[in-house]
């Protein structure tokens, strides 16, 4: 799909997914690292738990479909080399702090002189301008300021962080979409485009289901602890069993596999399989349609 296009990926761990997504669609992605390697090479987990630049599994995962070069961008030689690549590229994606690229003579105005049709995508915590633009922010900070952390944790306690760091992944995905949207505009206008991606704003977009619930149903989501909210329905994810607790999602393939396993193990009678269509159980349960066995009955059997 994107095989005719070339992407220059200058990002670190804050944006490498964007280039990977474009690469998955066929683009030729060239990873540009500093001479000592990208900081993402030092991100865990590491192969065999050996914290070395060539063993970062995160780096492997998000750069698996890219070619790689090293450039010392602060140097004149590095800048000249990059501008030479820009002249032949279609996209440039970077995750430098606001003002850092222009400070090296590699800002949008500099880059579009080298290539009047370039799509320049910049991923930052809070965007290129505004009261927080120059502030650093962790995954925790952005999850809080973007909104989704407000729904994490028990309702009678302060919010807690999201289980898996994901802010920069959302920002990177938005960057990939923004890059292609900007390219469509460039085709119409014949002008280079700058895409300003704010990680905070990307996290706000993850809350669209809450906005829709409020607008359509007048319902506001609240923290549910170990429960999951599906529209106006609250569904527990932690259940007490005979000898402890189990955490499952009682919907979709997970529940179906668990029931079949329990039948094989002899925990529940074989007629359970005959008496219910488990692969469609979750969908029917959510729609309020009749089901043969309640979720509590399934869990009580464990």
Image (spheres, rainbow, N blue to C red):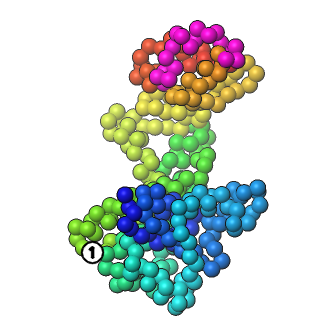
Residue 65 versus residue 296: which sits nearer the camera? 65
Residue with the most extreme front position: 3
Left or right placement of residue 170 versus residue 216 in this view:
right
Task: Give the quadrant of the C terminus.
Answer: top right
Task: Give the quadrant of the N terminus.
Answer: bottom left
Which residue is drawn at the image coordinates 61% and 71% (left, top)?
Answer: 38
Q: Main secondary structure of the magenta part?
A: helix
Q: Residues within 10 Å of mark 1 (few under 14, many from 20)?
A: some
Say which element carries label 1. loop
Depicted 213 relative to depicted 205: above or below:
above
Read off the residue under disc 1: 191
Image quadrant assignment for residue 47: bottom right
Percent from the top left, x then y, of residue 250? 56, 26
Image quadrant assignment for residue 25: bottom left
Residue 16 versus residue 26: which sits nearer the camera? 26
Which residue is drawn at the image coordinates 56% and 81% (left, top)?
Answer: 71
Left or right placement of residue 4 versus residue 95 in this view:
left
Depicted 296 relative to depicted 252: above or below:
above
Residue 44 versus residue 150: which sits nearer the camera? 44
Report if residue 275 lies within the magenta region: yes
Which residue is drawn at the image coordinates 73% and 18% (left, top)?
Answer: 242
Left or right placement of residue 296 versus residue 178 in this view:
right
Percent from the top left, x then y, of residue 215? 33, 39
Image quadrant assignment for residue 266: top right
Percent from the top left, x then y, of residue 3? 39, 63
Q: Give the residues drawn in magenta, as a range.
A: 264-282
Which residue is drawn at the image coordinates 50% and 79% (left, top)?
Answer: 100
Depicted 197 relative to depicted 192: above or below:
above
**Would you say residue 281 is visible in this rendering?**
yes
Report if residue 76 lies within the magenta region: no
């Amino acid at each position: 799909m994107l095989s005719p296009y070339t992407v220059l990926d200058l990002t670190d761990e804050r944006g490498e997914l964007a280039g990977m997504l474009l690469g998955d669609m066929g683009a030729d992605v060239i990873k540009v690292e500093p001479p000592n390697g990208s900081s993402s090479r030092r991100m865990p987990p590491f192969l065999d738990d050996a914290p070395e630049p060539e063993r970062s599994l995160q780096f492997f995962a998000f750069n698996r479909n890219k070619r790689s070069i090293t450039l010392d961008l602060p140097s004149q030689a590095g800048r000249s080399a990059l501008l030479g690549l820009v002249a032949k590229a279609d996209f440039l994606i970077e995750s430098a702090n606001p003002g850092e690229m222009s400070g090296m003579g590699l800002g949008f105005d500099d880059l579009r002189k080298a290539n009047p049709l370039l799509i320049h995508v910049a991923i930052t915590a809070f965007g290129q301008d505004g009261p927080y633009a120059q502030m650093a922010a962790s995954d925790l900070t952005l999850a809080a300021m973007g909104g989704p952390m407000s729904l994490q944790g028990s309702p009678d306690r302060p919010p807690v962080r999201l289980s898996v760091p994901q802010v920069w992944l959302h920002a990177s995905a938005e960057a990939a979409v923004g890059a292609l949207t900007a390219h469509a505009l460039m085709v119409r206008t014949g002008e280079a485009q700058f895409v300003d991606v704010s990680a905070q704003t990307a996290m706000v977009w993850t809350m669209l289901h809450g906005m829709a619930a409020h607008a359509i149903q007048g319902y506001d989501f609240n923290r549910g602890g170990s429960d999951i909210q599906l529209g106006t329905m609250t569904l527990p994810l932690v259940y007490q069993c005979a000898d402890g607790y189990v955490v499952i999602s009682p919907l979709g393939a997970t529940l179906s596999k668990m029931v079949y396993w329990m039948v094989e193990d002899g925990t529940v009678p074989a007629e359970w399989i005959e008496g219910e269509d488990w692969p469609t159980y979750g969908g029917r349960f959510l729609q309020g349609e009749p089901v043969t066995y309640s979720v509590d009955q399934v869990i009580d059997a464990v």
